Image: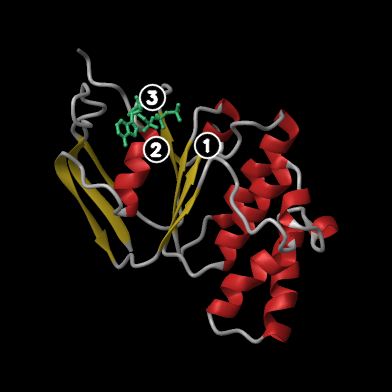
């Protein structure tokens, strides 16, 4: 599995160029941090990596990567579905029976420090709990690559620290993990940094 970029650059119509000439070769087992000032194009680069946006320059090749998950800055979930249900759904979608999916979902919630809110509806979770639940749900999914966008934007430092632990847990030889952040704490948890710098005017 690889995500290989060569000479990537992007410019939205009528706007100055964001970044230019980025080349990298992303592989499983490494936590990649996309860092750069606000507005430099980190989310845009994630869109390009997801295949949802065509770069205006260069190209990106996904080798052996079919399913890509994207965890947004603001946690998204079915408001009235419980945390355990949300994590069980991707396991059911992968073909597990409910009696198999539930204990696995429970284990994941436990690993992500959410055992105590397993039965709580999504809309009643705190921001940090909801963010961790989205990460647990992604870990339960069969993704070849997971793109995480600013997961600690609105969180206190203790919760941000926990999110860092959780993201490290997601790194495995089975998936590519990319994290866009300008949080120093998370940046320090990454194995490799990809700098997204604005193009000089
Ligand atoms: N669809 C779009 N059309 C036009 N401009 C866009 C579009 N999406 C983003 N932009 C602009 O491109 C620039 C880069 O946005 P992006 O969200 O990628 O930056 P970022 O580095 O992720 O920022 P932050 O760290 O603040 O989240 C911004 O100026 C933004 O307004």
Residue 99 at what x, y percent from top left?
73, 85
Which quadrant is the N terminus positioned in?
A: bottom left
In the rendered view, tell whether residue 94 sits above or below residue 60. Answer: below
Cα–Cα gap, marks 1 and 2: 9 Å
Which quadrant is the C terminus positioned in?
A: top left
Residue 107 at what x, y percent from top left?
74, 68
Count of number-bearing discs = 3
Which residue is rendered at x = 49% and y = 70% of the image? 142
Which residue is rendered at x = 49% and y = 33% of the image? 181
Which residue is rendered at x = 71% and y = 63% of the image? 81
Cα–Cα gap, marks 1 and 3: 13 Å
Cβ of mark 1 under 8 A from ligand 1: yes
Q: Is 68 situated left or right of 75 in this image?
A: left
Q: Is mark 2 on a helix, strand or loop?
A: helix
Decide which of 30, 11 is in the foreground and name it: 11
Query: Mark 1 packing: few (<14 Cα in 10 Å), some, or many (20+)?
Result: many
Q: Is 51 situated left or right of 114 in this image?
A: left
* Mark sitting on residue 43: 2
- Please say if the residues under marks 1 and 2 sit with CB atoms less than 8 Å apart: yes
Query: Mark 3 packing: few (<14 Cα in 10 Å), some, or many (20+)?
Result: few
Residue identified by numbered label 1: 150
Q: In which quarter of the image is residue 78?
A: bottom right
Residue identified by numbered label 3: 39
């Amino acid at each position: 599995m690889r995500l290989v970029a060569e000479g990537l650059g992007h410019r939205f119509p009528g706007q100055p160029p964001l970044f230019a000439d980025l080349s990298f070769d992303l592989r499983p087992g490494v936590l990649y941090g996309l860092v750069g000032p606000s507005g430099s194009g980190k989310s845009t680069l994630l869109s390009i990596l997801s295949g949802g946006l065509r770069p205006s320059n260069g190209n990106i090749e996904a080798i052996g990567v079919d399913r890509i998950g994207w965890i947004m800055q603001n946690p998204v979930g079915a408001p009235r579905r419980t945390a355990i249900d949300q994590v069980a759904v991707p396991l059911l979608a992968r073909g597990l029976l409910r009696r198999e999916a539930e204990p696995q979902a429970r284990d994941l919630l436990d690993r992500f420090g959410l055992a105590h809110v397993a039965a709580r509806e999504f809309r009643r979770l705190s921001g940090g709990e909801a963010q961790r639940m989205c990460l647990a749900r992604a870990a339960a999914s069969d993704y070849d690559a997971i793109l995480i966008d600013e997961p600690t934007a609105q969180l206190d430092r203790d919760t941000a620290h926990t999110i860092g632990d959780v993201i490290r847990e997601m790194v495995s030889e089975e998936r590519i993990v990319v994290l866009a952040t300008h949080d120093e704490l998370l940046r320090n948890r990454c194995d490799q940094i990809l700098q997204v710098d604005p193009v000089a005017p």
